[in-house]
């Protein structure tokens, strides 16, 4: 990173939101409606719809999930979900899309714990390069995102083909309960202090309910095993 760029404390570069900032509860979110509802939900950009007339119109804006630590770039009129959503609007020195990309690099304290994280986020710092540099960063990241989208679409098509093949072949057999054909067992606890982020010599990969966690000095299994997340966001 260019050390000549100014580093700005995130709280100091946020400006007040113009107009309505009303929230609605989860029970008020509809499957169909006039206006998209944005929550801190991880997997979806839009969590539902609302017919509430009090919409947020000061966009583009970033919606931050106070519990989930998600960032969503919103450039359309929307209604705000009540549970743990923070609205972030940068000062004019930042191009909003650059701000969205850069703020995701913030090292948020206790990110993996269930608590409110905005108090940590606002104390982090964000680089402020000249606007031509911001525009270049936006252009290059957008190009990579487009390539990623194309590859995801290819992957989805292949997964559909695999599913159809698997389903057609299984019509020839019988259906059995998992407990009848395999032994299921919870994994052994590994302290986070024993898990390293890098693979030094003679270390072993460690997997948990949310996927790959790092490397450890000891192992618990040999061979090929299906791994099912028992608890965690990615079960």
Image: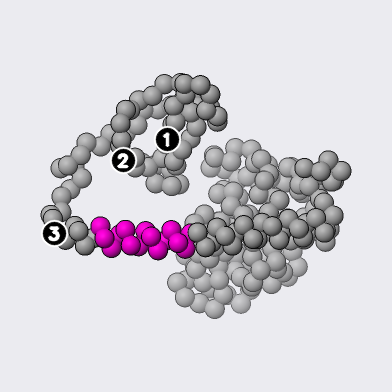
Near-viewer residue (203 or 21): 203
> At 48% from the left edge and 28% from the top edge, which residue is drawn?
215
Horizontal relation, residue 100 to residue 4: left or right: left
Horizontal relation, residue 54 to residue 153: left or right: right
Mark 2: secondary structure: loop
Mark 3: secondary structure: loop
Residue 172, numbered circle = 3
Judge whether residue 161 is colored magenta.
Answer: yes
Q: Position of residue 146 (x, y in %)?
A: 59, 62
Dividing the picture into quarters, in which one does residue 82 lie?
Answer: bottom right
Mark 2 residue crowding within 10 angstroms, few (<14) / some (14–19) / many (20+): few
- Of badges 3 and 2, the one in the foreground is 3
Q: In which quarter of the image is the N terminus?
A: top right
Q: Specify the segment rendered in magenta.
A: 152-166
Residue 171 visible: yes
Circle 2 sits on which residue?
226
> At 13% from the left edge and 55% from the top edge, which residue is drawn?
173
Q: Position of residue 18 (x, y in %)?
A: 75, 68
**C-alpha separation, residue under disc 1 versus residue under disc 2:** 11 Å
Q: Position of residue 31 (x, y in %)?
A: 45, 72
As drawn, 192 above or below 102: above
Circle 1 sits on which residue?
207
As drawn, 141 above or below 127: below
């Amino acid at each position: 990173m260019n050390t000549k760029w100014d580093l700005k404390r995130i709280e100091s570069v946020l400006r007040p939101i113009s107009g309505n900032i009303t929230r609605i509860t989860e029970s008020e979110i509809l499957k169909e409606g006039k206006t998209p509802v944005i929550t801190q939900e991880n997997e979806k950009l839009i969590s539902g719809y609302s017919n509430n007339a009090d919409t947020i119109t000061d966009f583009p804006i970033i919606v931050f999930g106070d519990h989930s630590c998600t960032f969503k770039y919103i450039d359309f009129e929307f209604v705000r979900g009540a549970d743990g959503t923070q609205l972030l609007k940068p000062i004019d020195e930042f191009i909003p899309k650059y701000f969205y990309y850069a703020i995701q690099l913030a090292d948020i304290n206790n990110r993996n714990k269930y608590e409110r994280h905005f108090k940590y986020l606002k104390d982090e710092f964000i680089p402020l390069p000249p606007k031509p540099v911001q525009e270049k960063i936006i252009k290059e990241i957008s190009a990579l995102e487009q390539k990623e989208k194309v590859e995801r679409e290819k992957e989805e098509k292949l997964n559909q083909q695999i599913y159809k093949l698997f389903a057609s072949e299984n019509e020839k057999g019988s259906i059995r309960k998992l407990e009848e054909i395999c032994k299921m067992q919870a994994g052994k606890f590994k302290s986070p202090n024993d898990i390293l982020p890098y693979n030094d010599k003679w270390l072993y990969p460690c997997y948990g309910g949310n996927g790959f966690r790092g490397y450890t000095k000891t192992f618990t299994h040999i061979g090929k095993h299906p791994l099912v997340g028992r608890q965690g966001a990615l079960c």
